[in-house]
Image (cartoon, rainbow, N blue to C red):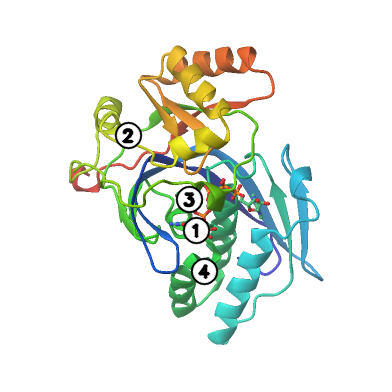
């Protein structure tokens, strides 16, 4: 980033369109097979050089994070350590975090914020330090590497083995969160078995239409949904609301509680979001679009 100017960075919501839990490591972390996309809703960060480090929280969910250890500060500390090891100094920064995504909601808000900090700092670092930072990102959380990539992808391992899809359509979606915070470790713990089937084989070139994504997702699962619904039954109501509003496919993201519905077009998604929000005051409901990847080989 420039020495004196503010740098903005977007932290897009991460959506696990499918999440298959396929094993467990000796350290307790679970092995995943997950189709992930990123929505055009998210948090917004602004990094400004300052006399001392500071974190300012704003946005609808900012107050809920006051007084807590913030992953944004941990990401900055990590970047500083990695840069210092390559002889580079990152000076004091004032960071404003506009927190638009609900906290502990399965859409990777904290991970996306951490990735946004790393992304904003990278251009000012030597190439070797940038590579080190990409490798170190997993230490901040299993979802951070995929958020740093930011493209539609398949994630394997504990979330660090990433295969970006060569093409992916702009996917009209509704995100609905019934207002309950979910602890990710608690849901993994409640999973009856870690050995479930992998993702079905998908097209090598990715997906070119909304219909092809929906057909594929109908063969998929989120293995964390049943344990999450047993802890918070309102997640089941959220899935039903998306189906009743006409979603071609609906499922829970991550460890919940946010659920997504895929719609044929953006105007249907807008109408559905309006209807779900009106019937469920207190829920967080957004019409959005999963960000597309254009087929590079077709260019
Ligand atoms: C559910 C997902 O959101 C799917 O993308 C992620 O797997 C969770 O990613 P995350 O929140 O960044 O996870 P971390 O902060 O690294 O881990 C929180 C806790 O979740 C559990 N955890 C997380 C990731 C993983 N692959 N297996 C796990 O068992 C572990 O108990 C871990 O201590
Ligand atoms: N910047 C941040 N944004 C959100 N949560 C944060 C942040 N910093 C620290 N946290 C803490 O991290 C925990 C997980 O929050 P987060 O919103 O990232 O969960 P999530 O959406 O379920 O993530 P995932 O989908 O990666 O499991 C919360 O308990 C919260 O207090």
268 in relation to 82, above or below? above
In the image, what residue occupies the spot 65% across and 75% down? Answer: 90
Q: Earlier in the sequence, mark 3 or mark 2?
A: 2
Ranked by sequence position, the earlier of labels 1 and 4 is 4
Task: Identify the mark nearer the N-term, 1 or 3.
Answer: 1
Q: Quadrant of the C terminus?
A: top left
Q: Residue at x 42, y 31 (%)?
A: 251
Q: In the picture shown, does residue 139 fall above or below 296?
A: below
Seen in the image, is 171 located left or right of residue 99? left
- Does the residue tagged 1 have its C-beta within 8 Å of any atom of ligand 1? yes
Up the image or down, 107 lies above or below 277; here it is below
Residue 194 at least partly seen? yes
Give the left or right position of residue 203, taking residue 120 as reference: left
Find numbered disc 3 in the image and state the secondary structure of the residue it sits on. helix
The residue singled out by tag 1 in the image is 144
Quarter occupied by residue 100: top right
Q: The residue tagged with tag 2: helix, strand or loop?
A: loop
The label number, if any, that marks residue 169 in the structure image: 2
User: Is the CB atom of the residue marked by disc 3 within 8 angstroms of ligand 1's nearest atom?
Assistant: yes
Q: Closer to us: mark 4 or mark 3? A: 3
Spatial CA span between label 4 and label 2:
31 Å
Q: Which residue is mark 4?
A: 139
Quarter of the image with the N terminus in it: bottom right
């Amino acid at each position: 980033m420039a020495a004196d100017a503010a740098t903005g960075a977007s932290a897009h919501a991460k959506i696990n369109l499918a999440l298959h839990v396929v094993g467990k490591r000796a350290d307790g972390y679970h092995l995943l097979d997950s189709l992930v996309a990123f929505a055009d809703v998210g948090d917004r960060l602004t990094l400004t050089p300052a006399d001392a480090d500071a974190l300012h929280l704003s946005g609808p969910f900012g107050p809920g994070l006051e007084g807590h250890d913030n992953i944004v500060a941990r990401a900055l500390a990590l970047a500083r350590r990695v840069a210092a090891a390559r002889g580079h100094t990152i000076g004091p920064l004032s960071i404003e975090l506009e927190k638009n995504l609900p906290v502990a909601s399965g859409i990777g808000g904290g991970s996306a914020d951490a990735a946004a900090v790393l992304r904003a700092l990278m251009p000012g670092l030597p190439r070797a330090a940038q590579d080190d930072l990409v490798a170190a990102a997993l230490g901040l959380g299993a979802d951070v590497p995929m958020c740093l990539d930011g493209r539609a992808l398949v994630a394997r391992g504990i979330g660090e083995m990433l295969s970006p899809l060569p093409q992916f359509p702009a996917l009209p979606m509704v995100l609905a969160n019934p207002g309950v915070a979910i602890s990710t470790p608690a849901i993994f713990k409640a999973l009856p078995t870690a050995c479930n089937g992998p993702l079905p084989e998908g097209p090598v070139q990715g997906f070119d239409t909304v219909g092809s994504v929906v057909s594929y997702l109908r063969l998929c699962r989120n293995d964390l949904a049943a344990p999450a619904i047993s802890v918070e039954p309102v997640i089941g109501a959220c899935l039903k609301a998306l189906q009743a509003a006409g979603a071609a496919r609906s499922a829970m993201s991550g460890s919940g509680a946010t659920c997504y519905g895929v719609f044929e077009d953006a105007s249907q998604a807008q109408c559905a979001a309006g209807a779900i929000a009106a019937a469920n005051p207190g829920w967080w409901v957004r019409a959005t679009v999963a960000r597309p990847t254009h087929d590079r080989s077709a260019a």
